[in-house]
Image (cartoon, helix red, strand yellow):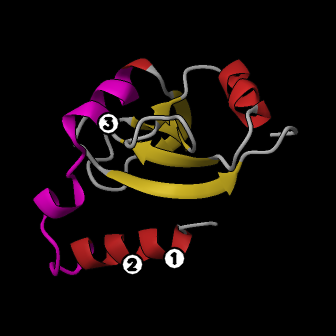
Amino acid sequence: MDFRLARATKLASYRTGRASRAEVCDAQPELLRNARACSRRTRRTCPICEHRHLVEVTYVFGPRLPKSGRCITSSGEVATLAARAGRHEAWEVEVCTECGWNHVIRTYPLTAAS
């Protein structure tokens, strides 16, 4: 699932003053820690502060994983989790470590070919 429309709506709310910066830059401390330690840098600039490149953090949810998901640190981890029994789903989140902007950008089921 792609979340571009929801992202555009959130940004429009901020730009028109219907949402405050605190409402759109609300990354939790755990997400910010993971963004600094376990992320992939992108070429996209933060749509709020425009100071840093966004990073992407991937979490996997599924059987025998923590309720809050497991933060992925390598592509090998994805393959290992995809091979496990049960349905696992990956969530990719874009994060700005400068201002705290964050938004889910896509979700997808893990398969052995992921």
CA gap, disc 2 and disc 3: 22 Å
Q: Position of residue 26 (x, y in %)?
A: 20, 51
Q: Between disc 2 and disc 3, whose residue precedes? A: 2
> Can residue 97 be seen by looking at this rendering?
no
| Residue at the spot of label 1 | 5
CA gap, disc 1 and disc 3: 22 Å
Nearer the observer, disc 2 or disc 3?
A: 3
Q: Choose top left, top right, bottom left or bottom right for residue 4.
A: bottom right
Residue positioned 15% across, 78% down in the render: 17
Q: Amino acid at mark 3?
A: Leu
Residue positioned 37% across, 42% down in the render: 68
Question: Is residue 20 rendered magenta in the image?
Answer: yes
In the image shown, does 62 or 51 lie closer to the viewer? 62
Q: Is the residue 6 above or below the residue 111 in the image? A: below
Nearer the observer, disc 1 or disc 3?
A: 3
> Can residue 47 be seen by looking at this rendering?
yes
Relative side of 11 to 79, left or right: left
In the image shown, does 78 or 101 lie closer to the viewer? 78
Q: Mark 3 falls on what kind of element? A: helix
**Is disc 2 in contact with disc 1, using a CB cutoff of under 8 Å?**
yes
Write the start and end of the magenta stretch as one range. Answer: 15-36
Q: Is the residue 55 above or below the residue 104 in the image? A: above
Q: Between disc 1 and disc 3, whose residue precedes? A: 1
Residue 31 is tagged as 3
The outermost residue toward the right is 113
Looking at the rendering, in which quadrant would you find the C terminus?
top right
| Residue at the spot of label 2 | 9
